[in-house]
Amino acid sequence: MAVRPMVNRDSQFFWDGTQVGELRIQVCNACGATRFPPGPACQQCEAYDRGHEVAAGEGTVYSYVVHRHPPVPGKELPIVIALIDLDEGVRMVGEVEGVDDLEIGQRLRVDFRRVDDDLTLPVWRTV
Amino acid sequence: MTTRTLSGKAAIVGIGATEFSKASGRSELQLSVEAVRAAVADAGLEVGEVDGLTTFTMDTSSEIAVARELGLPELRFFSRINFGGGAACATVQQAAMAVATGVADVVVAYRGFNERSESRFGQFSVAAATQVNTNGLDNAWTYPLGLGTPAATVAMQARRYMHEYGATSTDFGAVAVADRRHAATNPHAFFHERPITIEDHQASRMIVDPLHLLDCCQETDGAQAIVVVSAERARDLPQRPAHVVAAAQGSGRDQFVMTSYYRDDIGIPEMGVVGRELWRQSGLTPADVPTAVLYDHFTPYVLMQLEELGFCGRGEAPGFVADGAIELGGRLPLNTHGGQLGEAYLHGMNGIAEAVRQVRGTSVNQVPAAVDGHVLVTAGTGVPTSGLVLGAALV
């Protein structure tokens, strides 16, 4: 059973995006600052006026782990999980499919894995 | 020193714990009540004198439940601190503030759980991912993506630390070897008489690369309690007081719980906040501390703490911990009770008790200079956290 994300009105846009194959990053409508994870108040200009852009979907491995123990709900171990610096300047966590190890600095591209009707997760593959 | 300070206003006068096991056979509430009674007895006080209780937000036994079992007629102070093990030293800070201001006279900080035989702390916590609060929302960016065990969240930081500074797994292993050496001579430690070598560490199975099993602390059933009174009151009690020379909490910019990954540097700057405040309050420097208890749920964080607290420069901890420097007889013995890898994982509270024993001069691995000196203790790492400097004498 996959773990479902808690979602509120500040983060709904992100999960709506994965459903349609878009990796969305919050952008402040007032000053243009990008931000991940999203939040209601701009950390740069204090505005409560936010929108989003769709990321190009590529990034660089900043760090990573190979998770072997203990069990993770909905996953067959081991799994490789990376911290990815997106080209847009934000950083996010994601599972990397199709590899059993990784290196810092490697390039990754996003893909999407449909879990069920309500949830699609971003996943990553080496470029 | 300014007059607006907590330094020297309060003291730890009693410590008490249950046995540390893998299956306590009794409820978490009973464990906490037993520990509180033991701590109060150690302080030479009557249970009925306790008028304040403080614990972790995570603790499953409320202050009023503990008070009922103790038969306390009234409580004048009760409080809880958030963020897992980061709360440990802050519970003592809460108690110290309460007794320093006269809000209460005898405050007991406690933490009790069956985190081995019941809800295991090392497992993937679906509950953490589904909290209906901002912590749960924060975890949406990691847990559903597969990153949701304490070891995994730490491994992410450890890997980057290795990359940035050339640290190796054997550098992390130095912490495990020191802890287990100290536990080996501590009869209360789960790993009493079971030291390890660096080869044992390297041969232990991978949990989450780059962390081996022996980089990870235990899961423990047990409870620990700490009694705090004013410095004046402490003078009339039987134990040598461990004065609260400094007590601090710390949270950093863009702070998360175990997943502060979105900062430029994904280290533990929140511990730097704690450290700067401890040194400011105490007027001490790292060179003045002959021994410390640094929170060790995972070995890499001990290295990162040494740097954040100013014991060495950024990236210098691998050299600092080499050649037995953090073992008894070394330049800065750490975790002389065996730490959470060796003694027990009581969410940092057993480390505070060890600092008290060092100040009293009753540790099984006594550091002579600690008796008339000062001991630093830290709470959980990777989370908003806290720290203490304890001392027999005031600065």
Image (tube, coloured by chain):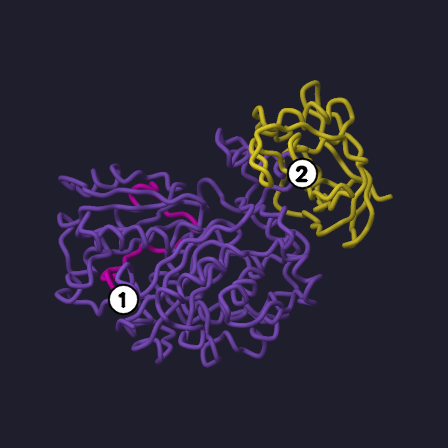
The residue sitting at 33% across, 62% down in the picture is: B353
Question: In this image, B133 relative to B370: left or right?
Answer: right
| Left or right position of B325 against B351 | right
Residue named by callout 1: B242
Q: Position of residue B326 (x, y in %)?
A: 50, 74
The residue identified by callout 2 is A33
Tell me the purple chain.
B
Residue sitting at x 21%, y 61%: B42
Could you tell me which chain the residue with mark 1 belongs to?
Answer: B
Q: Amino acid at mark 2?
A: Ala
Numbered range of the magenta stretch: B8-30
Category of crowding for the residue at label 1, using alpha-carbon neighbours closer than 10 angstroms: few (below 14), some (14–19), many (at least 20): many
Quadrant, the C terminus of chain B = bottom left
Seen in the picture, residue B307 relative to B79 is either above or below; the reply is: below
Up/down of B342 relative to B138, above or below: below
Residue A20 falls in which quadrant of the image? Answer: top right
Chain A as rendered: colour:
yellow
Check the image and name the residue furthest to the top: A117
Q: Which disc number belongs to residue A121?
A: none
Q: Is residue A92 left or right of residue B217?
A: right
Residue at horizontal 43%, vertical 56%? B379
Q: Would you identify the image quadrant in which residue B5 lies?
A: bottom left
Quadrant in which the N terminus of chain B is drawn: bottom left
Q: Amino acid at mark 1?
A: Ala
Q: Are marks 1 and 2 in contact (CB under 8 Å)?
A: no
Q: Chain of mark 2?
A: A
Nearer the observer, B343 or B61: B61
In magenta segment, residue B362? no
Residue A65 percent across, percent down from the top left: 69, 50
